[in-house]
Amino acid sequence: MEGGFKMARKPIDYYIRNERERELTDLADDLAVQFAKRASMHDVEGSFPFDNFQDMKDAGYLKLSVPKEYGGDDLSLYELVLVQERLARGDGATALAVGWHMGMVLSLRNTRAWPEEIFADFCRDVVADGAMINSFASGTATGSPSRGGKPETKAERTADGWVITGRKTWSTLCPILDRFILSAGIVGEDRVGEFLVRKTEGVRIEETWNTMGMRSTGSHDVILDHVSVPKNALLELTEAQKKSRRHSDGSGWMLHIPAAYIGIAYGARDFAVEFARTYRPNSLPGPIADLPHIQDKIGRMEVLLRTARAQLYATAARWDENVEGRTHLRNELGLAKYVATNYALEVVDQAMRIVGGTSMFRSLPLERMYRDVRAGLHNPPMDDAVLRGLAQTALQEND
């Protein structure tokens, strides 16, 4: 761990239920240890962690959520949450970035929203070459697609296929992807298409991602200048404001987001607890861990983390078990994200209070964790949407 402190002793994790889950978490833990060594460098430079992704490719991590029939491991949502949380303890930005690929493949496996031939070819590329995917839907005027904005990017029919023009923002993973999903409004129609686009001539990246936190997710702008794609690049065509088939499973895969932020908070907790055990100012007879107010802060971190993890894993397990009722878990999925991100913020704040003024130094990881965890408020679903959904459900109970 940065700053000369050793990694915290691995405690018993009661959310690991069987040997397969133990093997998966061991894999993620080993990767997290390596990522933690590079996290500060990538954060300071704002560089994309190609080295981390090579490690994940070599370890077989990128194929975990691919169907077994195509060479993957059929990762469940519960298992996805488990490994993503562990990964984020080493580097939250890497975990959040790869989570989009991992979760999206899990969703495609469950919904079969793509034509099977295209999905099968992509899965084989993941297994053989470490291919990855993400969906680019945000635009400058569109804002977050979760708010229902129409795509500014346009697709026009041609004799041979389509020509796509536009700019996509918040395009996480774009430095490493050779293909991506893109939403575009159909010229002359009130419909939206989802296209599988290769990074070919006419597609370029503008490096706009210079942010306070999550600096190494590679979420730059992707610009398409009259990019020609074949007819079969169109994956789906829906009426404007309608959801893609990829959301037909309730979008449980997006629990990878709160998993990452809980992981960051857990890493901050581990650092602060180890600091409290070992820091002995000459004004005290022992370490600061003996002080009641420090123990109060550690206790507060435990309450927040244990509550957030309980909510997250219970929701993931319900989604896995309740196949027919997944679309009815929207409030629970939103609540898990709301609790995780807001509690994670407070955990990192408490960790910095324990460590004190030195927590602001870049030679320690806490200031990076503090900046990274703040980004969780801007990932979907947003707090106001979660609260509104819960309120509407409560108001309708006696109707």
Image (cartoon, rainbow, N blue to C red):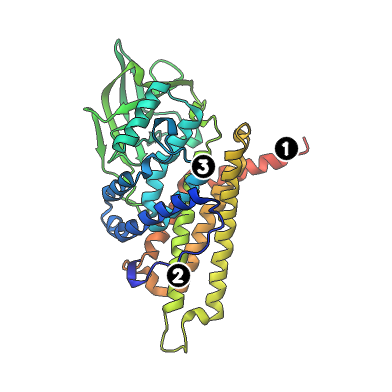
- Tell me where residue 300 appears, x and y as whole percent: 57, 67
Mark 1: few/some/many CA within 10 Å (<14, 14-19, 20+): few
Q: Nearer the viewer, residue 46 or 133?
A: 133
Instruction: Tell me the number on the disc at residue 396.
Output: 1
Residue, x 36% and y 54% (percent of image)? 31
- Which image quarter holds the N terminus? bottom left
Give amino acid for label 3. Leu
- Determine the CA span between mark 1 and mark 2: 44 Å
Q: Is residue 223 above or below residue 96?
A: above
The dot on residue 45 is: none
Q: From what the image shows, is residue 181 above or below residue 115?
A: below
Towards the viewer: 93 or 98: 98
Side (left or right) of 135 relative to 262: left
* Amino acid at dot 2: Ala
Q: Earlier in the sequence, mark 3 or mark 1?
A: 3
Out of 169 and 81, give the one closest to the viewer: 81
Instruction: Specify few, some or many for label 2: CA neighbours under 10 Å numbering under 14, 14-19, or 20 or more.
Output: many
Say which residue appears at 48% left-offset and 29% top-offset. 246
* Residue hosting label 3: 77
Question: How far apart in space, not on screen, are marks 3 and 1 (Cα)?
Answer: 30 Å
Whether the residues at callouts 3 and 2 have beta carbons within 8 Å, the answer is no
Residue mark closest to the camera, 3 vs 1: 3
In the rendering, at what x and y percent does residue 340 appear?
A: 53, 53
Question: Mark 2 — residue?
Answer: 272
Give how far apart the Cα atoms at labels 3 and 2 are. Answer: 30 Å
Quarter-of-image position of residue 305? bottom right
